[in-house]
Image (spheres, helix red, strand yellow):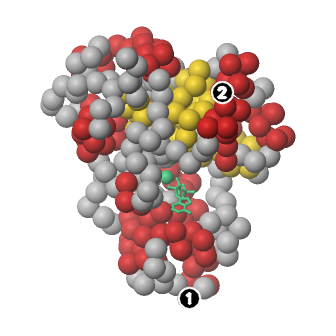
Amino acid sequence: MDDFRADLHCHSTYSDGTCTPFELYELAKNIGLRGLSITDHDTFEGYIALCNTSQMLDFTVIPGVELSCTQEETDVHILGYSFDPDNAYFREFCRHHREKRIERNKLILEKLKEHKMIVEEQDFMNQERDTQTFGRPHIAQVLVEKGYVKSIQEAFKKYLGEGKPCYEKGDKWPVSEGLDAIHKAGGKAVIAHPHLINRRRIIRQLLELSFDGIEVYYSRFSFTDNQVWQKIAKEKNWFMTGGSDYHGSIKPGIKLGCSYTNEESFTMLKKHFFETAPKYAKKFRDV
Ligand code: AMP
Ligand code: ZN
Ligand code: FE
Ligand code: FE
């Protein structure tokens, strides 16, 4: 019986999700997942916090992160897995990324002001939560709270989405630098939701880089979409991952575990993690 499911793409309160890392673990456990990775934007401090809780966890949660990078002006998200969470260089790399986001958020707030919507940094950065990475979803939430829009979706659709009047690209890292940082920390790098990159030229370039895997199963994509990427992964001899991109109530309709990674890929990532950072093995009951 193969009912193994590991969701390797979700977000916690450390970035723009609405569950804490421990709540994500508990939810995963309740729905019968046997593996998990929390892939917050530009931070894995939530993973470190989860591992610092006193209790043992029933199944392995591997460290993860989602980096927003750019390749010839096109946004490319990279998922990093099974790196050493104590790698100082990578922690610093992510911290620097988060600081760049603060500058980008300021530019977004200026644009909103030009459209007569007043949002201050402290409206979303002063919360009593552990959030480390602030981005458009946090700004969208304030727009809803202040009554400028009715929903987060509307905020993206009218103002914050790509090509909309208050969109700001920000200063992102080239894909090659994101890849390099993940590898330096001993991790594996995966092209996130490739279905969303709709420029063939960019895809061709990415397939020539030193990725280790592709996220072939992703919540909003069809069986046929997935097959295309499975074929590519097989040709490249890259492993295949899957995940929901669960964000909690920020993105209603996407459930944890609706897309997942199989046992073979998860076992490989798990093994790699415990070779890279052996001290973490004592945290999990299934090792
Ligand atoms: P940022 O990292 O600041 O560029 O924001 C990107 C994040 O915004 C994504 O990871 C999603 O969580 C969220 N997002 C993007 N588009 C939408 C949308 N249309 N509705 C809700 N959330 C969205
Ligand atoms: Zn997000
Ligand atoms: Fe993404
Ligand atoms: Fe994501």
Q: Secondary structure at mark 1?
A: loop
Residue occupying the far right of the picture = 201
Residue at horizontal 19 percent and vertical 34 percent from the top: 53
* Image coords of residue 4 (percent x, y): 39, 24
Q: Earlier in the sequence, mark 1 or mark 2?
A: 1
Mark 1 close to ligand 1, CB under 8 Å = no
Q: Tell me which corner region of the image, top left, top right, bottom left or bottom right, holds residue 275.
A: top left
Task: Choose between 261 and 287: the one closer to the eye.
Answer: 261
Task: Choose between 248 and 112: the one closer to the eye.
Answer: 248
Residue at horizontal 30 percent and vertical 64 percent from the top: 127
Say if 194 sits above or below 73 in the image: above
* Image coords of residue 226 (percent x, y): 63, 35
Q: Quadrant of the N terminus?
A: top left
Numbered disc in front, either 1 or 2: 2
* Image coords of residue 64 (percent x, y): 45, 33
Label 1 crowding class (10 Å Cα cut-off): few <14, some 14-19, many 20+? few
Three-letter code for the amino acid on which mark 1 is drawn = Lys
Residue at horizontal 74 percent and vertical 33 percent from the top: 206
Q: Tell me which corner region of the image, top left, top right, bottom left or bottom right, holds residue 235.
A: top right
Residue 142, which numbered label? Answer: none
Residue 116, which numbered label? Answer: 1
Residue 53 is left or right of residue 269, and the answer is: left
Q: Is residue 203 visible?
A: yes
Q: Secondary structure at mark 2?
A: helix
Residue linked to disc 2: 230
Residue at horizontal 25 percent and vertical 21 percent from the top: 284
Residue 286 is left or right of residue 211, and the answer is: left
